[in-house]
Image: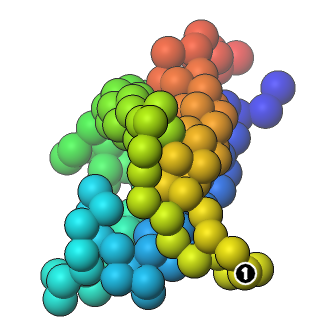
Amino acid sequence: MSDPFRLAARAYLAYGIVYWVGGVYLAWHGVGVRGGRMMQAGVVWIVLGLVFVIVIPYLLAGRRAWFERWVLSRRDFARVLSLLMAFRGWEVLKVALRAETATVAAPWGGVVTFRAGAAVFFVVTVAALACVARAAWGRQETAR
């Protein structure tokens, strides 16, 4: 049977890349956190986001003795991550369900509404959340 934590790591990596690329694209167009205007601190968020995209899957994919000894077990880390992802999903869903939203230029021409973008991000979040939650709360395999 495959390791659910490796699957969770791959799912989080895909989720992180989608969010990071989307965030960079919005920042490139001057849109910051929660749809506000982009400020200088935005570069810090872009770099920090890239660090999370790399570090979180690394911590999920395999046991790290130093991390599990001093911070959290891999299972508890996945549980905390699941809760944070569920909150993110809820916030993105609220944007997707708004009656009116702003727009941003689409890479292929035309415009994309924040509502449509949020719907895509919501689907990606729920798919990754399912994988992380399965690792966090699924049955633990016993060693033979």
Residue 126 visible in the snapshot: yes
Looking at the image, is 13 positioned above or below residue 68?
below
- Location of residue 27 (image quadrant): bottom left
Determine the residue located farthest toward the right in the rendered image. 1
Count all numbered tags in the image, as a single digit: 1
Residue 12 visible in the snapshot: no
- For this rendering, which residue is in front, 73 or 29? 29
Question: What residue do we see at 50% from left, 15% from top?
Answer: 137
- For this rendering, which residue is in front, 8 or 92? 92
Locate residue 117, reporting x and y percent.
Answer: 57, 54
- Location of residue 32 (image quadrant): bottom left
What quarter of the picture does the N terminus occupy? top right
Q: Viewed as shown, does residue 89 lie left or right of 11?
A: left
Question: What residue do we see at 43% from left, 84% from top?
Answer: 29
Locate residue 132, reporting x and y percent.
Answer: 54, 33
Q: Viewed as shown, does residue 139 lie left or right of 99?
A: right
- For this rendering, which residue is in front, 107 or 9? 107
Locate residue 6, reporting x and y percent.
Answer: 66, 44
Question: What residue do we see at 44% from left, 87% from top?
Answer: 28
Looking at the image, is 134 positioned above or below residue 93?
above
Question: What residue do we see at 37% from left, 69% from top?
Answer: 49
Locate residue 30, reporting x and y percent.
Answer: 35, 83
Q: How is the image coloured?
A: rainbow
Q: Residues within 10 Å of mark 1 (few under 14, many from 20)?
A: few
**Amino acid at the residue labelled 1:** Gly
What quarter of the picture does the C terminus occupy? top right
Q: Secondary structure at mark 1?
A: loop
Determine the residue located farthest toward the top in the rendered image. 139
- Judging by the rendered image, the residue that carries numbered circle 1 is 109
- Location of residue 109 (image quadrant): bottom right
